Structures are given as C-alpha cells and as structure tokens.
Amino acid sequence: MRREEAATFENERKQTQYRRLPKGEKKILDAPGLKNDYYVNIMSWGTKNNILAVALGKEVYLWNSKNETVHRLLSADGRNDCITSVNWSEDSKTLALGYMCSKLQLWDAESCKLVKSLFSLSL
C-alpha cells in the first residue's frame, strides 16, 4: 500500500469525538450593581491564577475559583471614580483597572496592593 492510501485508510477509521457539555449551570455568582453597557469591560478571568475580577459600581471583587472565596480588592471613593475596564496581565500577576475619569491603576494580585497609578492630563 502506498503512503497516501495508508493515511486515507487510517483517517477513515478514526471516529469523531464530541465534547460533552453540561445541561445546566454549575455555579451562579451574585453580582449586584453589574453594569450592562456595551462600552465597558468589567469582568476578566485570570487564566494562570483562576481568579475572576469583577467591577461592581465603584468596587472590585476577586473570586477565587479554587477555594470559592470572594475578596474585595478596593472601593473607589471619588464621584467620577466609576470603573469601566478590568483586565488581567498575561501571567495573571497584575490587574489593570481603567476608570471613567481617565485614570489607570495597576494592582499586584498576590499582595492586593496598588503598584502604579496613571492619570490623563486634560487640556
């Protein structure tokens, strides 16, 4: 048998395996004050640390999927300090928070400490 015929024969014998999806939800998290707006990105999943970061109004919460604990990272105090963007770094060690007032904060995930705060100067 030639190589091409052997490869075709082998592919015909393989069966397609389908993924099994759950029929219902596994976990439902309470999220009061969740902003439903097309222009905001208020949830981010840390792929390395399995932590979900969620901005609810002026507060940011971290949900650890391993031990199912919730930790409040911060509560913004200013009038225009509405959080509009949340995103983990690629290594899931740093969390970036963007604010409506053109402010950006970088937080260390392990220590839950503010690493850097950047502001936009409006003209």
Image (cartoon, rainbow, N blue to C red):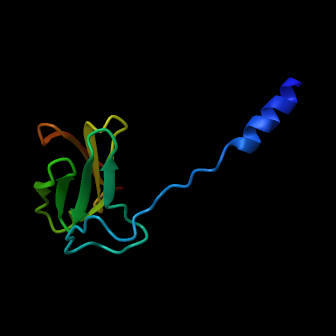
Q: Position of residue 59 (x, y in %)?
A: 16, 62
Left or right: 89 as drawn, with respect to 64:
right
Asked whether the viewer can see residue 30, the reply is: yes
Q: Position of residue 97 (x, y in %)?
A: 27, 51
Q: Quadrant of the C terminus?
A: bottom left
Q: Quadrant of the N terminus?
A: top right
Q: Residue furthest right?
A: 2
- Say which of 32 and 81 sits in front: 32
- Say which of 30 and 106 sits in front: 30
Vertical side of 44 occupied by 5: above or below: above
Q: Position of residue 75 (x, y in %)?
A: 11, 60
Residue at 37% from the left image edge and 65% from the top image edge: 40
Residue at 26% from the left image edge and 53% from the top image edge: 52
Residue at 37% from the left image edge and 37% from the top image edge: 90
Q: Residue furthest top?
A: 2
Picture quadrant where residue 53 is located:
bottom left
Picture quadrant where residue 7 is located:
top right
Q: Position of residue 107 (x, y in %)?
A: 20, 42
Asked whether the viewer can see residue 121, the reply is: no
